[in-house]
Every structure is written in C-alpha cells, then in structure tokens.
Amino acid sequence: MVRLATVSSSFHARVIAARLGSEGIVTDLRGNVDGVYPVGDVHVYVDQEDLAEAQEVLMVDEVESAFDDPDEGAELGPPKELWLVLGAVLCIAAALFSRTF
C-alpha cells in the first residue's frame, strides 16, 4: 500500500475512501481515524497498482468541482419564514408589554 493523500479529518478521509470505493479501488485509512478526539492527520492508502487511477479519480473530481456554481441551491441567511415568525413574536411581546404599563 502507498499513501495517496493526507487529510485533516476522518470525515474527509472517509469521503475519499467512499469515492474511490465506488470505482472499485480498495483503500486503507491510517492515523487518527476513530480517535476519541478529532485531532491529527488521516492518511489514505491504496495499492501500488491502483495509485495512478486513484490520483486521476481525485483530480477529475477536483476539476469538476471547480466548475460548480457556488450559489446553486445555496440560500444565504435565514429563511423568510423565520423573519415572519420573529416579527410576529416581537409584535405580541410589544402588545403584552404595552398593556402592563
């Protein structure tokens, strides 16, 4: 087995392992994979014969993600409904507060 990548979290390492596994590439995760505290690097290893293909798969994924629209499906800030509920709560609180004085 040879090291393909080193990442800073076990989640990222598992995503890489799952992506390579979908292509039939066997991976081995070493380092702080299931540690109590999520600190430390995780190394992703593949067989020597699969190294070139694994590098190509990761590179293709990275290139394709560079063309993704960052605003696609992403909503910045809280939803409009939350503002409506917050406004209603503030109106009710103001009405109750004005009756007590």
Image (tube, rainbow, N blue to C red):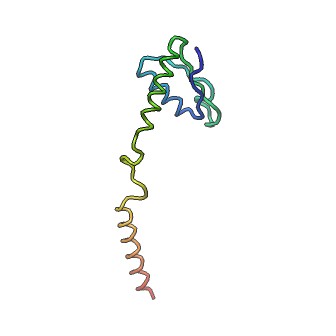
Find residue 23 and report its image quarter: top left
Q: Position of residue 14 (x, y in %)?
A: 50, 29
Indicate the quadrant containing the N terminus: top left, top right, bottom left or bottom right.
top right
Q: Position of residue 18 (x, y in %)?
A: 45, 26
Residue at the far right in the pictured view: 40
Find residue 77 and report its image quarter: bottom left
Q: Residue at x 57, y 26 (%)?
A: 5
Indicate the quadrant containing the C terminus: top left, top right, bottom left or bottom right.
bottom left
Front residue of 2 and 94? 2
Residue at the far top in the pictured view: 49
Q: Position of residue 28 (x, y in %)?
A: 55, 20
**Apparent side of residue 85 relative to residue 15 in the rendered image (left or right):** left
Instruction: Name above or below for residue 69 compared with residue 18.
Output: below
Front residue of 101 and 24? 24
In this figure, what is the number of numbered marks?
Answer: 0
Find residue 65 and report its image quarter: top left
Instruction: Name above or below for residue 1 compared with residue 16.
Output: above
Q: Position of residue 3 (x, y in %)?
A: 59, 20
**Apparent side of residue 36 relative to residue 63 in the rendered image (left or right):** right
Q: Residue at x 44, y 82 (%)?
A: 97
Q: Residue at x 49, y 28 (%)?
A: 16
Instruction: Name above or below for residue 78 compared with residue 13.
Output: below
Front residue of 8 and 90? 8
Q: Residue at x 58, y 30 (%)?
A: 34
**Apparent side of residue 6 relative to residue 78 in the rendered image (left or right):** right
